[in-house]
Amino acid sequence: MEADKESVFTIQTHYDWPNPDAKQLVTFLQFVFLPSFNKNLDFEGSIEIMNSTTLKKKYKFESFDKWATALENGISYTSGRFTNLETYHNIDIIVNFIDYRLSFWATISEDEYVIMEEIIRSLEKHLQLINNDTQKGISFIEYNYFIPKPIEPKEFLNSFSLVVSQFNLQKINGEIKFASPSGSGLRYSNYKSWSYAVEIEWSGITQIYFHVENRPNNLRLQWNYTTDNLNIRVEASSVQEANSILAGLEKKLNITPVNQGGTSRLTLEGGERIYFAKNNVDKDWFRKAIHIIMKYFRPDFYCELRLRISSNSQQVFVWQNISEWQENVLNKWTEMLEASSYLSGPSLTLNFRYDHRRERVILEVKARSKETAEQTFDNISQDLELQQIASDIYAHPQSSGYFAISSWHNKDFADSLESIVKQFIKSKYFVQEATIIETAQQEGESIHNFKENYGNFLVRLKSDKPYDEVHFKVQGPRGAALGIHVREKRKRLEIKSSLNTNEFINLVQIFKDNLGLKKIAETREAAQSQKTSLKDSIWVIICLPIFLSLLTNALLTEQIKNAPYSKNTLEIIAPLDNQAKPVTIPSKTVHFIWVRIYERWLDKDIFYNNTADIKIVNDAGKIMAEKKTAKPNISFVLPPGSYQAVITIEEYGLKEAVSFEIPIEAR
């Protein structure tokens, strides 16, 4: 079935302008054109300054006033496009100051014809133009295409030759533009020179432009490689003739116009994978990684290179120059936290993120086909000796224990913890949490966060100043993880780790020697379950018979229901805490939801609207956000970093905290 094709009535006028004067053109547009064409018009314009055949400078404008102010004698080319925002018809004025030519090109509806002829006559008189010809009733077709696959320069030029073979190519207007230096380009008036330059410079080209006029037939091609958008406009005396000119190109390249069911956008396929480095990572490994990643880089790709270091962990340093980024990463190697490279072009997106403390690589690849993406994943992981892992590898501890503490000294505990980290986590690690909670009689509970300063954390642990709780979680390369929690005013110790059974026994022995540990259960949850079971046994043996006898009296039953046994608890729903895994928030906007749970005998009520005080501190202990009597589902916008939120319902004496982090790539 023949697809509908856009047929538009146009007027074109082409002139010689013996004495071009930019200011005269501005005067005509301001005082004749705009008042006559009293419509809601949008504008875009450009000015180019040429040096021989090399494009020296090009300026673009979205305001008529700014364009008119910049328009002066001495420029090489200028163009202005007025768009009727009601009909979306265009009026173009193009001036070639080098060849002394002016073209006026209008797409019009039938009721605009009379006013357009008046404007043309005024234009000729005001600027003293010599009319070459006036073409009326020209039909054109204009299509957008998206190239569905990579194309080689010879393939493109051979296909395009089928179209241009129908034109006289003695004089053309051809142009190619490059990614580097930004905005640079070359112009050509000879077809062979233009096509040769396209073939030779293909790898660095971002845009291709071609225009030839053989009145009444004209052809214009624009290809933006960065977006893979190909725009072709053909003018002829009829729609059928214009369409026949394009038929060969569409068949050869196997492309279909967007408005006829062709690809409307380039969809890349792929995904994200997480890896550990199989071997220890050093500077040579990272140099190799950069070399491998940059094999995929093209000059027209968007490139963003980042670095975060321990001495200034809140700041992200950004480059777009690969050599400068590599030099800075290697110079800051010992204090590097994270480094990443993001490359994006029309056929590939490649995001390489390296977490130095965990020697972890997060690799995102999107390509034109799933097979290409898979092959890219395989090539990079093999070359860099990467082992793919599950995204939640830190979420499942291999060993754990919950202990009673019989002997406590601050220094003994701190020395044990320091020894364990050195022995089992080694020298490279990511501190997920390092919190000390102390209670003063007058000030109440105070939370101190040392996440970004492990040394100060140890100093505080060893000091004589008392504290009630300690929460320490650390992660290392290849899945190494350790969580140590001192609870109930230094009476309980909870340990979770990635160690095997024998290693875990050795770890516990270090604490046993200093703290006199006695094991209660495998986990804290199991210990709490044991308490519940004991309470249940007492209830069945002693309380249940009494309770059943009281049921015979309705009044006493009601009294029992309202007996003094009751409990309020505060539960944070979002962000959802998980002690064995970082709570990572993918957005800079963080939502907080909590509930109060009230339990009495066999009843449980959940209150979703209890107001609370919320305070958010960063890992340096600085308060980043605070709100009194906040309602649940409150949100805060925070920069990338590590935080702890403390939620308090003072009316019921409830307080809970949750730690979370916002990665540098969060939006």
Image (tube, rainbow, N blue to C red):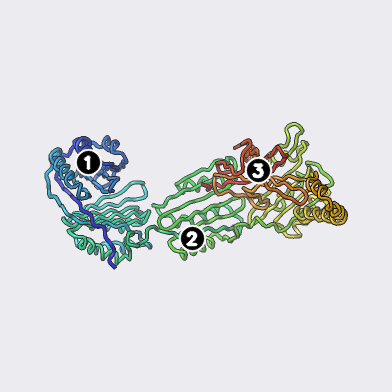
Query: Element at badge 2?
Result: strand
Amino acid type of the residue tagged 1 in the rendering:
Phe
Can residue 44 be seen in this snapshot? yes
Q: Which residue is identified by label 1?
A: 37
Q: What distance separates the C-alpha of mark 3 from that of mark 2?
A: 35 Å
Choose the circle earlier in sequence order: 1 or 2. 1
Placement of the N terminus among the 4 image quadrants:
bottom left
Amino acid type of the residue tagged 2 in the rendering:
Gly
Q: Nearer the viewer, residue 635 or 641?
A: 635
Left or right of 285: which side holds 134? left
Task: Kindly report which numbered mark, 3 or 2, lies closer to the viewer in this rendering.
Answer: 2
> Looking at the picture, how far across and down is residue 67, in whole percent?
28, 38
Please identify the quarter of the rendering in which residue 48 is found.
top left
Mark 1 surroundings within 10 Å by alpha-carbon count, few (fewer than 14), some (14 through 19), many (20 or more): some
Q: What distance separates the C-alpha of mark 3 from that of mark 1?
A: 66 Å
Q: Nearer the viewer, residue 624 or 502?
A: 624
Task: Kindly report which numbered mark, 1 or 2, lies closer to the viewer in this rendering.
Answer: 1
Q: Which residue is identified by label 3?
A: 451
Mark 3 surroundings within 10 Å by alpha-carbon count, few (fewer than 14), some (14 through 19), many (20 or more): many
